[in-house]
Amino acid sequence: MILGETRFDPDEAAFREEGVAEVWPSIAFPRRPLGIRAADAAPVFGDANTAILFTVGRPYRRISVDGHGSWTEWIEIRPDVLAEMVSELPFPSGCAPAPTQAHLAHRLARRRLDSEGAVDGLALEETALAIASHVLAAGRALQREDGPARSARERAHRDLVFDVQMLLNRRLGRALSLADISDALSVSPFHLCRVFRELTGIPIHRYRDRLRLRAALEMIADGDESVLDVALALGYSSEAHFSDSFRRAFGLRPGAFRRSMKGSGPTRSFSPERRSRRHRHREERPKG
């Protein structure tokens, strides 16, 4: 298992060039929303809720969201280990949900790496393996057999879900009704809800709530805004509503989580921005 991160500004040639995983498949966790279009496939959208899956030898291009570049943190998986993990079904295509347990474990692991630099390699690899296992299991749960009719319909459905995900990320802190979303995308509310839940496993409102709460993790851990300011910025009607939702998702109220992050210890802060890093020294292979 190898962990790393890659950042590209939107005006960099590397952001616009075609990419490919050349040696090991990988699971990428976008820190910024990002679209990926692989050859002969519908685009997939990666964000705080959705990991992007890169298979070896399959070219792809990045899609900028609102003119931003890409910032992904990723886990590369040795092919024989991956084969054992997905022995019952093929590697899920394109993307997979990032369950809350996997998302939180990944964020904490990254904080330890960024603040300490050197960590227990064995513990890190076991954590990475558990994270990858959770994500792949979530992806397999949504995977279905392909067929000619299903393939064409699936592509149209994935295009629709991509557009919904982009809209939710763009308007994360703003109130959105089902009519707002369906009108913006020119589809019926019933079709919109059915397709989104079919492909993501959860309804639209829950997907948006997870995006908000995962954004709140970063804002509370590293920012100076009050809990009330974070709540209002993310579209919650009150601090109490936000605090209750945060506790249900992560097991701690926002104030207690902030104290655990700001206190002394390895998870205190992120390191200064760096261009690209990998752990377990290996030649660089940029990701999305």
Image (cartoon, rainbow, N blue to C red):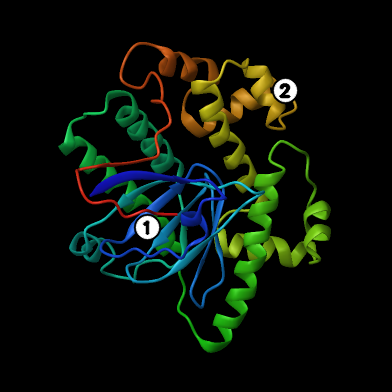
The one nearer the camera, 248 or 123, is 123
Q: Is residue 244 above or below residue 31?
A: above
Question: Residue placed at 75% from the left, 27% from the top?
Answer: 237
Name the residue tied to disc 1. 137
- 128 vs 173: above or below: below
Q: Nearer the viewer, residue 113 or 126?
A: 113
Q: Is residue 85 left or right of residue 104?
A: left
Determine the image quadrant of residue 79.
bottom left
Which quarter shows the C terminus? bottom left
Residue 27 image point, x, y percent: 37, 54
| Residue 205 appears in view | no
Q: Position of residue 223 (x, y in %)?
A: 55, 20
Question: Residue placed farthest to the bottom in the image?
Answer: 148
Q: Amino acid at mark 2?
A: Ser
Numbered badge on residue 238: 2
Local secondary structure at mark 2: loop
Crowd around label 2: few <14 · some 14–19 · many ≥20 (10 Å)? few
Residue at 54% over, 22% down = 220
